[in-house]
Amino acid sequence: MRGGMGNMQGMMKQMQKMQKKMAEAQEELGTQHFEGVAGGGMVKVTVTGHREVVGVALDETVVDPEDVEMLQDLIVIATNEALKKAEETANATMGQFTKGLNLPGMF
């Protein structure tokens, strides 16, 4: 009977270590920046690993009052590219914690 309790305590300690490592990994993701580019580099959008937009850079030649729609499209394209990069990195980083675990409904 005692072996079962010791095993349970060991599992709990492992889970706590894993939770701490996951929290650290998520925090680290938040400090990383990902850039999306459109229009041959005329539009750049920067997001964090937490998927927050932190910067938009526009080449002045792409700002045409007669074609605002094109600029809007380029911003959307660059933003989606940056978000995709952030998502892929987050999945790769956080996926290491779920490898081999059979957790229905998670990730």
Image (spheres, grey):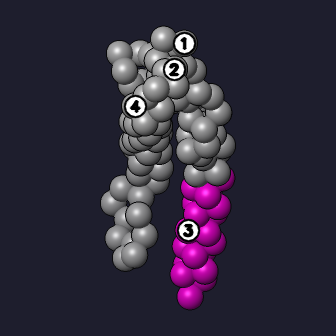
| Within-10-Å neighbours for mark 1: few <14, some 14–19, many 20+ | few
Q: Which residue is mark 2?
A: 63
Residue type at mark 3?
Answer: Met
Q: Which residue is mark 3?
A: 11
Q: Nearer the viewer, mark 2 or mark 3?
A: 2
Disc 4, SS = helix
Disc 2, SS = loop
Between the C-alphas of marks 2 and 3, the distance is 58 Å
Between the C-alphas of marks 2 and 4, the distance is 9 Å
Q: Which residue is mark 1?
A: 60
Front-most of residues 66 and 41: 66
Disc 3, SS = helix
Between the C-alphas of marks 4 and 1, the distance is 14 Å
In this picture, is 63 found above or below 9? above
Residue 30 numbered mark, or none: none
Residue 101 counted in the magenta span: no
Q: Which residue is mark 4?
A: 70
Residue 54 appears at what percent x and percent y?
65, 33
Whether residues under marks 1 and 2 lie with C-beta atoms below 8 angstroms apart, the answer is: yes
Residue 7 location, quadrant: bottom right
Q: Earlier in the sequence, mark 4 or mark 1?
A: 1
Residue type at mark 1?
Answer: Glu
Front-most of residues 86 and 94: 86
Front-most of residues 13 and 93: 93
What secondary structure predominates along the stretch shown in magenta?
helix
Disc 1, SS = helix
Number of numbered discs overlaid on the protein picture: 4
Q: Residue extending furthest bottom?
A: 1
Residue 45 appears at what percent x and percent y?
52, 29
Residue type at mark 2?
Answer: Val
Residue at x-position 43% and y-position 70%: 106
The answer to whether 79 appears left or right of 26 in the picture is: left
